[in-house]
Image (cartoon, grey):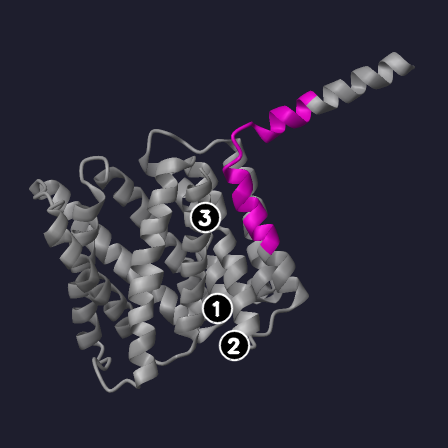
Amino acid sequence: MKKARIALFIGIVCISIFPILVKLNLTPGVISAFYRMLFSLLLLLPYVLISKQFKVPSLKMAILAIICGVVFGSDVAVWNIAIQESTATQASLLTNLSPVWVGVLALFFLKDKPKTNFWIGTMVAVFGMMMLVGFTVFKTLDFDLAFSFGILSGVLYSVYMLLSKEVLKKMNVITFMTISLAASSIYLGGLSYAINEPFSGFSNAGWLVLVIQAAVCQLAAWLLISYATQHMRATRVSVSLLGQGILASILAWLLIDEAISLQMVFGGFVLLFGIRITFYEKQILSAFQSTTKSVKKRVLKRI
């Protein structure tokens, strides 16, 4: 358990570095996502060949894994743009709303429907989001590109989580990662070409950042988190991952002098607290009613 907790902590740190690297603006958003996927694939392939863990899946599973790659690639590209157009803090915290969107999608597409705690947590998280970006934005409905892409990133990631969960029931992790990374690379490469983003001409620092994104923020982070998930409760891992939004904010403040207001900090914590409620297993309303009844009994006894 101790090793799993250490792995989870290091994995969260690896993810938290990503918004800082993107915010440096050394490469465009979509091409940055392309090289993150491509370099990750190139780093993974030697292990795939040596370990021989790649298993040819059925056509249906292969198509679903490809779709996962396209959705995840879209998520990273959109998130990159949200970070570059706003702040690492806002983009990271808005993306952390993905558990909320998972619940909303589950309501329509899955048999296991969200419970009362989910909706209570969702309302708290949305209020925190409003505090984070400012109430005037919602009052005037002045949603800019960065805000919209931050929300879209969370939605795309939630779709990816639901799809990948089903695929991984019938496909091992190495096979899934190989297919999805290949699909992401091809898709993002074509998209970058279509919108005329440059494939070269970056500074040495730009190339270094791209390699770090692939090796640290993609491969290392998700291998460590996968290890932690195997040895810890999934809900505990999911809740812990929410901390990367706060850690990314702190790193942005320390490393790139990103301004953070007290309202943003408080709103971020409210948002994360709301999402934490959605993972709470005991029904909050039932617990509150039981506590109220207990207090009433004690008061009546004293009277």
Q: Work out whether mark 2 precedes mark 3 in sequence or the reverse, and give the earlier one.
A: 3
Q: Position of residue 49 (x, y in %)?
A: 10, 53
Image: magenta residue range: 269-290
Q: Are marks 2 and 1 in contact (CB under 8 Å)?
A: yes
The answer to whether one can see residue 145 in this image is: no
Q: Residues within 10 Å of mark 2 (few under 14, many from 20)?
A: few
Q: Residues within 10 Å of mark 1 (few under 14, many from 20)?
A: many
Res 106 → quadrant: top left
Residue 256, numbered label: 2
Task: Write the residue at 46% across / 44% down.
Answer: 5
Q: Which is closer to the viewer, label 2 or label 1?
A: 2
Q: Position of residue 303 (x, y in %)?
A: 92, 15
Residue 6, numbered label: 3
Question: What amino acid type should be assigned to the residue bearing mark 1?
Answer: Ala
Question: What amino acid type should be assigned to the residue bearing mark 2?
Answer: Ile
Residue occupied by mark 1: 88
Q: Which is closer to the viewer, label 2 or label 3?
A: 3
Res 53 → quadrant: top left
Q: Indicate left or right for 186 with 219 as reference.
A: left
